[in-house]
Image (cartoon, rainbow, N blue to C red):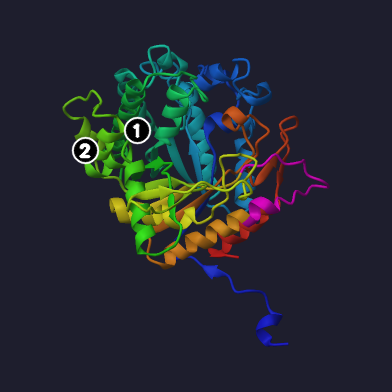
Amino acid sequence: MPAVLSRAPTPAPFPPGFVWGVATAAPQVEGAADADGKSASVWDGFARRPGAVARGDTPAVACDHYHRYRADFDLMAQLGVRHHRLSLAWPRLMPDGDGRVNRAGVDHYHRVIDALLERGITPWVTMFHWDLPQALEARGGWPERLVADAFADYADLIVRSYGDRVKHWITLNEIRVFVDNGYAIGRHAPGRKEKAELVNQAVHHALVGHGHGVRAVREHGGAGAVVGLCDNSSVPIPLVEEAADIAAAEALFAAQSCRVLEPIYRGTYGRTYLDFTSGWLPQMAPTDLELITQPTDFLGLNLYSGQCVRRGPDGRPEALAYPVHYPVADSPWLKLNARALYWGPRLAARVFGVEHLYILENGAGYDETPPVNGELFDLHRLEYLRACLRELKRASDDGVPVDGYFVWSFLDNFEWADGNGRRFGIVHNDFATQVRTPKASAAWFSRVCRQNALV
């Protein structure tokens, strides 16, 4: 037998300093929905509507991470995780959305951040991960300018409070998702179905909020602070990796990014945007675009899947539908096309000139059975993550400026409208007992983190 076949395969290393982490979001894991002065978020209210969330699940308890964060961080450290993306709950810190500060909430996150640092884990803090204070929604929500103004005060508060220890900031998570699902089709909180002009005005106000988040970090973040947006960019994947289909993917990526990335990176609502809105432009203050286009330090991408595209017979991009039996997770929107982890970063760098990229979410959701004898072999998730990292490694080797990767999610959690049954975690959570059980994917990802290599 040849000697090479008698030893384990050689790990494929990522660049030195590559960031490996796990991600969570406050409304999905914290619970303690009304503890210590926290007010209701839009998700607290939305989940109480009959039929809004699968099985009637709510975020009221979730993973009880609010009370169990120290043990959860111990488990992260045991797995070799050295970076954690988390979010702060706006209604826990400013219960009315603006004005009054809840000191108990501020003190709680002081303890959370200190607990991470004590375990050698670097916090990456998302300012807003969808839990708008219900008090602001009652005043009109994101379609109203007052929410962007309130976000400015909120961003100032949190960066001033934690900027001495937090040096990695993410302004908002997935603008198009929380606006379109929340205000256009009503599938997510706050469950509204508004006309297109109101929806696109909400996107603009979210971009203004992003600008205020960047401004707050520049003004109060101190030395070494970095900040960026987290976007769920649609990823066109060229059917054939040759010039014609690659050009089609680039053109479609630019078109599909016209509401978020184009104003941030090009400083305008351009022709593609005007085509998308039939010539409508949002109401803007004179300084809005200057605020929105402040330079950021990185772009975060949440990548789960993509859409195959080719150059069509008419020379324009042609999107191709997935066939019936294409591999899919239990989340039906999640077609298991790992090539998104190559083309998403590459397109962002190529089309918008992004120089530093992080994958801030990537994973797969399944309706899994409980552990047996303390083990859960989530081989479907493990193999998909391995395939995704193989494509990300290919991107890195090709010179795409991708600097880190965060798996979604650390824990099974409250998965929005899918409730507690749709599990994305690499650690199983028993919602009845709150017992955590690392899955096979956790053990594998632990080795990836420790070796800085695809294993």
- Image location (x, y in percent) of residue 126: 44, 37
Q: Quadrant of the N terminus?
A: bottom right
- Image location (x, y in percent) of residue 235: 43, 48
Q: Amino acid at mark 2?
A: Thr
Q: Which mark is residue 268?
A: 2
Chief SS of the magenta region: loop
Q: Give the side of residue 293 with respect to residue 234, left or right.
A: left
Camera-side mark, 2 or 1: 2
- Image location (x, y in percent) of residue 28: 57, 31
The magenta stretch spans which residues?
365-383
Q: Give the side of residue 406 with respect to residue 329, left or right.
A: left
367 part of magenta stretch: yes
- Toward the right, the furthest residue is 373
Residue 26 against residue 58 in the figure, above or below:
below
Q: Residue at x 57, y 52 (%)?
A: 81
- Toward the bottom, the furthest residue is 2
Q: Residue at x 52, y 25 (%)?
A: 187
Q: Amino acid at mark 1?
A: Arg
Q: Nearer the viewer, residue 233 or 85?
A: 233
Q: Quadrant of the C terminus?
A: bottom right
Which residue in the protein does label 1 denote?
A: 160
Based on the displayed image, in which of its 4 quarters is residue 65 positioned?
top right
Residue 49 against residue 129 in the figure, above or below:
above
Q: SS of the residue at dot 2?
A: loop
